[in-house]
């Protein structure tokens, strides 16, 4: 089947330029010097164009956490054991994780999806289990997953967005959990940007300098192993060295753009999924706001390639969608200022400069 026939190649929605223009005009009328609220103004204008209204709002945020295990942990590249992925799934669902607290704080819907973790069958209340496979294969030795498995993961992302849209969500955040997934994200970035692991690899959950050098070597070897097979094709790159949860996030971002649902991208891993989505369909980029610049080495380079202006810079490096969740406060504030400030006419304040 030709790639064009797949759902992820269907056209994405166009932002509403009229709404954008009207929002820009409104900003000029508000009781403040032009541009004085800086990025808060731009956020409101962007959201106006994406929501197709001069008065954008964020009342129903939706957060989906995608989890998956990684075969590359065999190479001893993480500070934590693989069992933590499963343990954290339970923590998300029971309300104890950072993103659980953030979701509750913002009255956001939190969906937790197991795309494929290692271990016996289980049943945790609040966790949707879709075991595509019990974690990826070790991409240092072979492809992480088959093309079919990668497509199944993309579909999980699509399904999550379709559900969010049907429930009236007005903004979407994808978070991730998977021991070893910064290693996978770095390998993806190396192949997508054609750069060395040295430039794109960080300490992840907190490995030491010696372990970091080992992680870089593992990624460099993996890139050499797969480079000729993937021929710059983002879907092949995703299947070769990606994670099930990273592929699911990629699918979610693609679907958000098709459905006209604004996205807040989280940190390093989420931004690599965003880069995959943009390489598959460049117009997806218009639907993305970027929550923060994380402390994970390499994130800045990804943001630069995506021409992204992160909202926060607070040395976060947790993942889970936590940085994007933290940025919701700024997005909501931007909307409130834009919608509720008085215009010069309403406040009987002169908007004319002297001279």
Image (tube, helix red, strand yellow):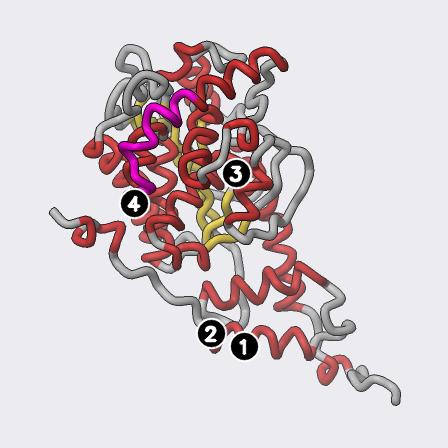
Callouts 2 and 3 close, C-beta under 8 Å: no
Camera-side mark, 3 or 1: 1
Mark number displayed over residue 316:
none
Lower position in the chain sequence, tag 4 or tag 3? 3
Q: Is residue 277 above or below residue 136?
A: below
Mark number displayed over residue 21:
1
Q: Main secondary structure of the magenta part?
A: helix
Residue displayed at 57% across by 37% down: 299
Residue with the mark numbered 4: 158
Q: Quadrant of residue 247?
A: top left
> Could you say whether the residue bearing mark 4 is in a helix, strand or loop?
helix
Callouts 2 and 4 close, C-beta under 8 Å: no
> Could you say whether the residue bearing mark 3 is in a helix, strand or loop?
helix
Residue with the mark numbered 3: 103
Q: Which residues are magenta?
A: 221-233
In the image, 235 versus 345, the foreground residue is 235
Lower position in the chain sequence, tag 2 or tag 4? 2
Residue displayed at 40% across by 55% down: 284
In the image, 296 versus 347, the foreground residue is 296
Q: Is residue 24 above or below residue 65?
A: below
């Amino acid at each position: 089947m030709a790639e064009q026939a797949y759902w992820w190649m269907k056209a994405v929605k166009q932002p509403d330029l009229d709404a954008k223009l009207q929002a820009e005009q409104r900003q000029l009328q508000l009781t403040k010097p032009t541009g004085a609220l800086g990025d808060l103004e731009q956020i409101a204008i962007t959201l106006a164009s994406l929501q197709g209204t001069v008065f954008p709002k964020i009342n129903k945020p939706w957060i989906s956490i995608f989890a998956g295990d990684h075969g590359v942990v065999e190479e001893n590249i993480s500070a934590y054991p693989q069992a933590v992925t499963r343990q954290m799934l339970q923590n998300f669902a029971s309300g104890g994780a950072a993103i659980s607290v953030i979701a509750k704080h913002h009255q956001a819907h939190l969906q937790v999806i197991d795309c494929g973790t290692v271990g016996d069958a289980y049943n945790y209340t609040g966790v949707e289990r879709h075991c595509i496979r019990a974690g990826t294969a070790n991409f240092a030795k072979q492809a992480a997953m088959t093309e079919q498995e990668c497509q199944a993961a993309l579909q999980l992302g699509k399904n999550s967005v379709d559900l969010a849209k049907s429930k009236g969500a007005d903004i979407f955040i994808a978070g991730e959990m998977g021991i070893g997934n910064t290693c996978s994200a770095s390998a993806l970035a190396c192949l997508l940007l054609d750069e060395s692991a040295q430039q794109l690899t960080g300490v992840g959950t907190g490995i030491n300098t010696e372990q970091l050098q080992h992680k870089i070597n593992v990624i460099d070897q993996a890139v050499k192993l797969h480079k000729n097979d993937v021929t710059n094709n983002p879907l092949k790159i995703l299947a070769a060295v990606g994670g099930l949860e990273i592929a699911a996030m990629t699918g979610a971002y693609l679907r958000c753009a098709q459905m006209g649902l604004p996205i807040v991208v989280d940190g390093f891993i989420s931004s690599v999924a965003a880069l995959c989505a943009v390489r598959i369909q460049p117009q997806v980029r218009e639907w993305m706001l970027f929550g923060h610049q994380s402390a994970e080495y390499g994130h800045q380079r990804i943001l630069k390639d995506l021409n992204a202006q992160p909202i926060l810079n607070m040395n976060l490096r947790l993942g889970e969608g936590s940085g994007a969740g933290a940025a919701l406060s700024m997005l909501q504030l931007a909307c409130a200022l834009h919608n509720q400030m008085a215009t010069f006419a309403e406040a009987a304040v002169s908007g004319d400069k002297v001279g």
